[in-house]
Amino acid sequence: MKKKYSIFSLVKNSLSDNQNWKKMWRNPDPRKFYDVIIVGGGGHGLGTAYYLAKEHGLKNIAVIEKGWLGGGNTGRNTTIIRSNYLWDESAHLYEHSLKLWENLSSELNYNIMFSQRGVLNLAHNEHDVKEIRRRVSANKLNGIDSEWVDPHQIKKLVPIMNTENCRYPVLGASYQPRAGVARHDAVAWGYAMRADELGVDIIQNCEVKKIRTAKGKVQGVETSKGFIRSNRVGVVASGHTSVLAATAGIKLPLQSKALQALVSEPIKPVINTVVMSNAVHAYVSQSDKGELVIGAGTDGYNSYTQRGGYNIIEDTIRAIVELYPIFGKMKMLRQWGGIVDITPDASPILSKCEVEGLYFNCGWGTGGFKATPGSANVFAHTIAKNKPHKINAPFSVDRFVSGRLVDEHGAAAVAH
């Protein structure tokens, strides 16, 4: 039975000093066998379990997380959501996700704080102008809201931006009004609650150390809490996916790198949209608390640590101050890093593999958060039906053999 959140329950629990709220989800011990095991308790993994139970009727499901829910990349990003990708395959996947975002608070009966404040992708040179205009046209052909805006229109949207007196003057931008941001923790919590209500076991602080296989079939996972059997295992472990895949004898075309972000001290509202720039590579939005959420690029070396180099922060701050001189005297409160896994074509892998019953959701690079509900939805279909949904069919791991790549490296308007 879905727990209802309403003004009445808020008032009732506030009168008891908020001491009588029920636990959001159970904390069960693992069973010996599950029909499906999902490795990774972030938004993608929890969402996959939710859709497996809700849309495909599977009940004996476990989500296994080595730390706490949302402690990986789900809680270590800049929360940007958009679907204005160039290639048809990417556009269909991210637009499917955006449509799910638009109704996700209602679907989960939990406020994920989805704010459709729009996203600007800036053009700083003639090449940028041509490529971004091309992408706007491609978006329109795919039914995605996207438009070209000139510097005058940009100044109306973001009055504090320095568009002329800088190394890379702003010549225009693409603008997607339906894009925006959401609260990353709320997404994980919302999916966790609803999956738990549907009977999914969410097992935290349980590290998967090895995927056990025999005769080309998956048998289960070796964990810090013992061996758990299953004939279907979906791996959604972001930067550590390639490490787990290797334990099953599979080498995935992934590189893991640190991706950094930082937030400022809170200030009054000064920017009411998301602004991204590829040429100077800095992107910024303002949270509901007033903090500036600032994103950087990936570090130039491979790493499995949730931190990065200070040179990246320095370059990012330099770019932010150049575009927004008003931020020059602000203090930064905290900085963090996530571990992103990047494929050769900067597009994800949503696919089964040569080991029967083993599936991978990985390779999102810097674009994973925006894809959360769409990725989870089609990955659940792939696991339940043992064949891809038409939306994720182009993102098979086999494309790196066939050469049918979905090359978003230069098309995504961010340097990932």
Image: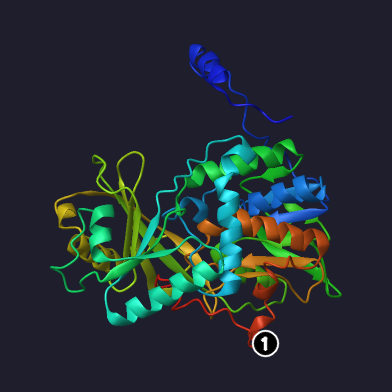
- Name the residue nearer the viewer: 99 or 314: 99
Find residue 178 and report its horizontal and vertical position in percent: 47, 53
Examine the rendering and report whether any part of residue 394 can be seen.
Answer: yes
Disc 1 residue crowd, few under 14, some 14–19, many 20+, Cα 10 Å: few
Left or right for 322, reference 83: left
- Residue that protrudes farthest toward the top in the picture: 15
Find residue 77 and report its horizontal and vertical position in percent: 44, 55
Question: Quadrant location of residue 392?
Answer: bottom right
- Name the residue nearer the viewer: 357 or 4: 4
Question: Quadrant location of residue 134?
Answer: bottom left
Work out which quarter of the rendered image holds the C terminus and state it. bottom left
Left or right for 202, reference 385: left
Can you identify the residue that label 1 sits on? Answer: 401
Amino acid type, label 1? Val
Q: Residue at x 51, y 53 (%)?
A: 74
Q: Residue at x 70, y 31 (%)?
A: 2
